Amino acid sequence: MTEYSRKDLKWTDSLRLAFGAHVELEEENGKSQPYDLLAEFEVHGQQYAVLRSSLRPYDEVELLRVLPGSEDQIMPELVTIDDDDEWENISELYDECTLPIDED
């Protein structure tokens, strides 16, 4: 069970406004790969993005943290969620918020 609930999630669109519906991420090998921006949201002040590979649309989604731009870097930065508990909680919350509400 996640430590967050639906009321903690706020849908956002800052990445879509900055990058559009598609982004390119640089992989470890230095090559850029295209991704579709499926969703973005904020939980307790921290932003997250849900991406899916444009080249492999049937792959699982990528869940990344969004770091705001700094003085040196105006655009936001997408980074891997290294903390397993954070990733699990945010992943479960996203799943819960994208599934229909069970009214029983």
Image (tube, rainbow, N blue to C red):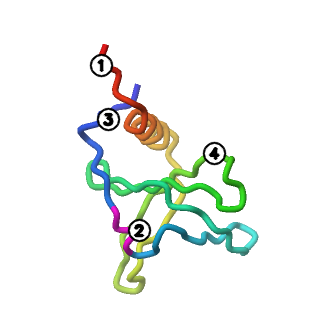
- Which of the two discs, 3 and 4, labels the residue nearer the N terminus? 3
71 drawn magenta: no
Nearer to the camera, 56 or 66: 56
Marks 3 and 1, how far apart at CA: 19 Å
Please tell me how crowded label 2 is: few (under 14), some (14-19), or many (20+) other residues with Cα within 10 Å.
some
Q: Residue at x 30, y 33 (%)?
A: 5
Q: Considering the numbered disc 4 on the image, is that residue within a helix, a strand or a loop?
A: loop
Does 79 appear above or below 44? below
- Which of the two discs, 3 and 1, labels the residue nearer the N terminus? 3
Q: Quadrant of the N terminus?
A: top left
Closer to viewer: mark 3 or mark 1: 1
Marks 2 and 3, how far apart at CA: 24 Å
Name the residue carrying label 4: 60
The quarter holding residue 8 reads top left
Q: Residue at x 47, y 40 (%)?
A: 91
Q: Considering the numbered disc 3 on the image, is that residue within a helix, a strand or a loop?
A: loop
Magenta stretch, residue numbers: 13-17
